[in-house]
Image (tube, helix red, strand yellow):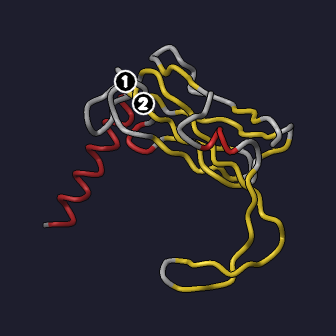
Amino acid sequence: MARITSIAACNALMLLALAGCSDKGLPVKEIYGNVTCNGENVPIGQVSFVPLSGTPGTTSVGIIVDGKYRIDAQGGVPFGKHQVRVDARKKTGKKVSKYIGTEMAMADEEVRMGPETFAGPKSPLTVEISANSDGRYDIELPPQ
């Protein structure tokens, strides 16, 4: 019985996403694009759309993989004005000791691409998402 309920819930969420509404009933748009820094594809990181004053909803996040990102969870990004924060990184090829959870382990060293300002609350990037948006939002970060 629990399995049927979870399948029904998943189907309901899929229908909401296809209709362009989030699970909270907000109108949303699937957003995707390329992320580059100084003309180079950003290999890893994340893009966050943070609602600005007057825009409903919560922060929407997409993972950057090989210079591309997509936000389609819960149907996408709510309509309205958003600050865009980009945590752009690349691996150096070196291994470093760092905590993974509560354990110390060797992991790939990562360095930031682009100015740190773009990753935080002072990011100068903003965008307005609407029904007329085509969903594509490419991001070009300046060099550090």
Residue 55: assigned label:
1
Residue at the top extreme of this rendering: 132
Can you say whether 37 is above or below 113 in the image?
Answer: above
Query: Which residue occupies 75% across, 36% down?
Result: 141
Quadrant containing the C terminus is top right
Q: CA distance from mark 2 to mark 1?
A: 5 Å
Q: Which amino acid is tagged 1?
A: Thr
Above or below, comparing residue 10 to residue 47 in the picture? below
Q: Return the residue at label 2.
A: 51
Q: What residue do we see at 69% from left, 83% from top?
A: 106
Q: Residue at x 80, y 40 (%)?
A: 37
Of residues 63 and 59, which is closer to you in this image?
59
Q: Locate residue 60, reporting x and y percent.
A: 45, 41
Left or right relative to 108: residue 133: left
Identify the image quadrant of the N terminus. Answer: bottom left
Q: Nearer the viewer, residue 121 or 138?
A: 121
| Label 2 environment density (alpha carbons within 10 Å; few <14, some 14–19, many ≥20) | many
Snapshot quadrant of residue 100: bottom right
Q: Amino acid at mark 2?
A: Pro
At which x and y percent is residue 24? 26, 36
The disc at residue 76 is none
> How many numbered discs, if any?
2
Rendering coords of residue 52 (x, y %) = 43, 26
Answer yes or no: do the residues labelled 2 and 1 have beta carbons within 8 Å?
A: yes
Relative to 64, residue 121 above or below: above
Task: Tell me the SS state at disc 2.
Answer: strand
Q: Residue furthest left?
A: 1
